[in-house]
Image: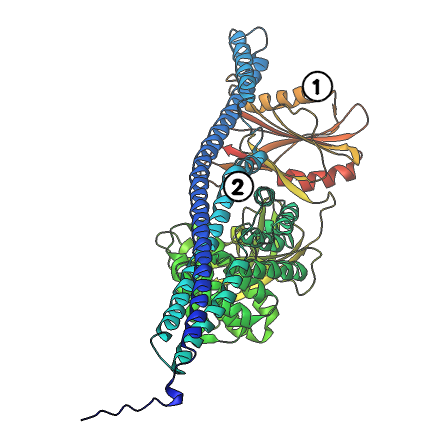
């Protein structure tokens, strides 16, 4: 039987099969070559990642070593400085004893030998320490920290660079994977005849084209580029900021970011420095809350740039949220603060930053919950000073909240009450109990604020309170010359507690206000969480100008000296300050150990000492001496006492008037303050402003 074969239909003939295969082969070759280029780029980025990671490890190890060296060097310098101060005291004592016994005493040669030996030893040690005075400690510490900080920044830059190269390498791996899928589809098209092959080949070619564009995009991605010069600027800026010169630090950080715009850490530091430079950090060195509006906006701009450049630092985001809050940008502030809390909920200040924004927005329940978390952490962190600083900053933030949202006063008062309750518990001594309930008619009456020596004193009556109710006095301050809407700053160093007495006028002191700054002061009195009332007062600028603390423990006293007054080229056994605009106005302070031969007649020895001072100055006593407690001393038990002293008016050879105030303590130490001025009125101004601001340390109980 014959078999008949039918010819194929025309549309079944695969006329372009060979040309399709040739085109596919060409595409495969091109894709393969492209894949080789991508593989090379991947290998290159991987190598660069490894190199950057290795450099980051090296800089990390180097930085750790430099940090150890800096810490060791600072400790050594400080210990040598302390030893020099001790030798100086011994030399002073030996010299004073030598002068007191004169040439006839048997102990005179011994004292003179001690005086010379201690002086030579102190001179020999002088070149072994970078610290020559107490006010140089912070500067030396900051300087020693420059090299470790530079190494840390280098590590951070190298780590960022390694991450950038690693991200590019990972992207190339992903690209190769997608390219392999495209090749698979193209290869699969060869197994299909007819138009179906194009349904497989076309997506494969499209993927290859996409991969080419993707590769171009990956290659164009920038990698962190920070110069050594920018790192040097950032490290120097940190040193300046640590030394207290935030304005100069801003200039250094600005130079760093202009040199290397990718430097995220420098942008973050610039943000913090801008805010610091715009305010007065001396009001609360631990947590600054107040700055100018322009400085705050610059701080926000720098902080946001740092985030755009890749910084994810928790402190940066926390501060940035607070900066937005101070400008009333509450939504941005809450988002940043909530994000910071989500990342770390074990820091009290982060909770308070979130809580104060919620207060300003009127979110009462959420705000009270945030403050509860923050107060629990602050009360249990084990560092009383830090706890009080954190609570003080929280109160200042609430002052800002009142400016931003005046209608939230009731909520602010509620939160302030909770802060007061926790602070009172922190300050309460054994056996003292913070009241939970207070009579509805309890209040303070007849309140006034006065000052004495270093202390601000709040006087008030306490009707409606049971005897021995624990009260907390919370002090606020606003510097002279600030605008009416500038918030008060809460000063935890002035806070104090006292016990009430029914119908009794009580006084409580804000201590450690070393130099009374001009401006407005406010004290709020709390019994538990209940605010009983507040008192305000105003202090103008001193006629002697701004006063700053001088002296210190190493010389045995502190003094609020006028900032403009200068010291002589050499000071011996004390402190001398002189008004450069009126050279007749001077103050000299001495602490001189007396000889052991004072004897029982201490008044006679004191008169002889004053006569010796008058004779040395060639001054003439112009009036009778008076005995009064005109000096302030601090005992070893940290209690202030008034020192029995003798005051003698005098006239100097050049016509200036003077006053000698001298005390002889039971520890056989002579403490003297000598004043001079052109006329009696000027002398009284100098006396009233300076004698009362001197506190002698280490006096006997």
* Residue 470 makes an appearance in the image: no
Residue at 45% over, 45% down:
51
Query: What residue would you read off at disc 1?
Result: 615
Question: From the viewer's perspective, is 129 left or right of 376?
Answer: right
**Local secondary structure at mark 1:** helix
Query: What residue would you read off at disc 2?
Result: 150
Which labelled disc corresponds to residue 521? none
Determine crowd level at label 1: few under 14, some 14-19, many 20+ residues with C-alpha closer than 10 A: few
**Local secondary structure at mark 2:** helix
From the viewer's perspective, is residue 248 above or below residue 424? above
- Which residue, as the protein is rendered here, is positioned at the far left? 1
At which x and y percent is residue 313? Answer: 48, 56
Looking at marks 2 and 1 on the same chain, the residue that comes earlier in the sequence is marked by: 2
Q: Nearer the viewer, mark 2 or mark 1?
A: 2
Viewer-proximal residue, 118 or 184?
A: 184
Quadrant in the picture for residue 139: top right
């Amino acid at each position: 039987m014959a078999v008949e074969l039918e010819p194929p239909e025309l549309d079944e003939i695969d006329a372009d099969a060979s040309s399709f295969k040739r085109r596919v082969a060409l595409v495969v070759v091109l894709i393969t070559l492209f894949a080789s280029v991508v593989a090379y780029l991947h290998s290159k980025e991987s190598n660069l990642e490894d190199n950057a990671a290795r450099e980051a490890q090296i800089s990390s190890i180097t930085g750790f070593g430099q940090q150890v060296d800096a810490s060791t060097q600072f400790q050594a310098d400080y210990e040598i400085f302390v030893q020099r101060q001790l030798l100086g005291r011994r030399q002073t004592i030996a010299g004073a004893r030598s002068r007191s016994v004169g040439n006839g005493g048997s102990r005179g040669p011994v004292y003179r030998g001690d005086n010379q030996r201690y002086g030579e030893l102190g001179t020999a040690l002088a070149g072994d320490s970078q610290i020559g005075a107490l006010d140089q400690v912070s500067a030396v510490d900051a300087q020693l920290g420059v090299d470790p900080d530079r190494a840390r920044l280098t590590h951070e830059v190298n780590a960022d660079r390694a991450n950038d190269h690693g991200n590019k390498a990972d992207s190339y791996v992903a690209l190769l994977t997608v390219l392999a899928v495209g090749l698979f589809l193209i290869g699969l098209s060869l197994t299909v005849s007819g138009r179906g092959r194009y349904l497989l080949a076309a997506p494969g070619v499209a993927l290859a084209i996409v991969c080419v564009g993707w590769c171009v995009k990956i290659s164009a991605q920038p990698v962190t580029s920070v110069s050594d010069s920018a790192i040097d600027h950032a490290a120097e800026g940190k040193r300046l900021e640590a030394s207290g010169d935030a304005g100069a630090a801003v200039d250094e950080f600005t130079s760093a970011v202009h040199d290397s715009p990718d430097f995220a850490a420098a942008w973050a530091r610039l943000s913090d420095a801008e805010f610091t430079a715009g305010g007065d950090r001396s009001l609360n060195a631990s947590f600054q809350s107040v700055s100018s509006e322009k400085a705050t906006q610059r701080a926000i701009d720098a902080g946001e740039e740092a985030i755009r450049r890749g910084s994810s630092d928790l402190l940066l985001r926390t501060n940035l949220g607070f900066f937005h809050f101070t400008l009333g940008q509450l939504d941005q502030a809450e988002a940043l603060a909530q994000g910071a809390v989500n990342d770390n909920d074990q820091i009290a200040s982060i909770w308070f930053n979130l809580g104060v924004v919620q207060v300003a927005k009127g979110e009462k329940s959420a705000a009270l919950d945030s403050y509860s978390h923050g107060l629990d952490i602050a009360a249990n962190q084990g560092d009383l000073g830090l706890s009080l600083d954190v609570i003080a900053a929280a109160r200042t933030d609430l002052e800002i909240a009142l400016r931003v949202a005046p209608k939230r006063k009731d909520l602010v008062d509620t939160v302030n009450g909770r802060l007061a309750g926790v602070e009172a518990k922190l300050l309460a001594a054994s056996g003292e109990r913070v009241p939970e309930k207070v009579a509805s008619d309890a209040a303070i009456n007849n309140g006034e604020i006065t000052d004495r020596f270093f202390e601000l004193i709040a006087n008030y009556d306490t009707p409606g309170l049971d005897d021995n109710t624990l009260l907390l006095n919370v002090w606020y301050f606003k510097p002279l010359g600030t605008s009416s809407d500038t918030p008060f700053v809460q000063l935890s160093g002035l806070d104090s507690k006292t016990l009430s007495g029914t119908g009794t006028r009580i006084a409580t002191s804000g201590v450690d206000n070393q130099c009374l700054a001009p401006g407005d002061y406010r004290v709020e009195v709390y019994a538990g969480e209940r605010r009983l009332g507040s008192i305000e007062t105003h202090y103008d600028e001193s006629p002697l100008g701004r006063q700053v603390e001088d002296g210190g423990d190493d010389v045995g006293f502190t003094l609020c000296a006028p900032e403009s007054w200068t010291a002589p080229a050499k000071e011996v056994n004390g402190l001398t300050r002189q008004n450069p605009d009126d050279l007749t106005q001077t103050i000299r302070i001495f602490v001189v150990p007396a000889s052991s031969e004072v004897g029982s007649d201490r008044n006679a020895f004191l008169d002889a000492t004053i006569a010796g001072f008058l004779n040395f100055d060639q001054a003439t006593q112009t009036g009778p001496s008076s005995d009064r407690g005109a000096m302030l001393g601090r005992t070893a038990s940290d209690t202030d006492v008034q020192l029995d002293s003798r005051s003698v008016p005098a006239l100097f050879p050049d016509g200036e008037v003077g006053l000698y105030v001298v005390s002889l303590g039971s520890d056989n130490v002579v403490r003297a303050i000598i004043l001079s001025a052109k006329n009696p009125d000027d002398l009284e101004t100098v006396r009233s402003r300076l004698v009362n601001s001197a506190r002698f340390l280490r006096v006997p109980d």
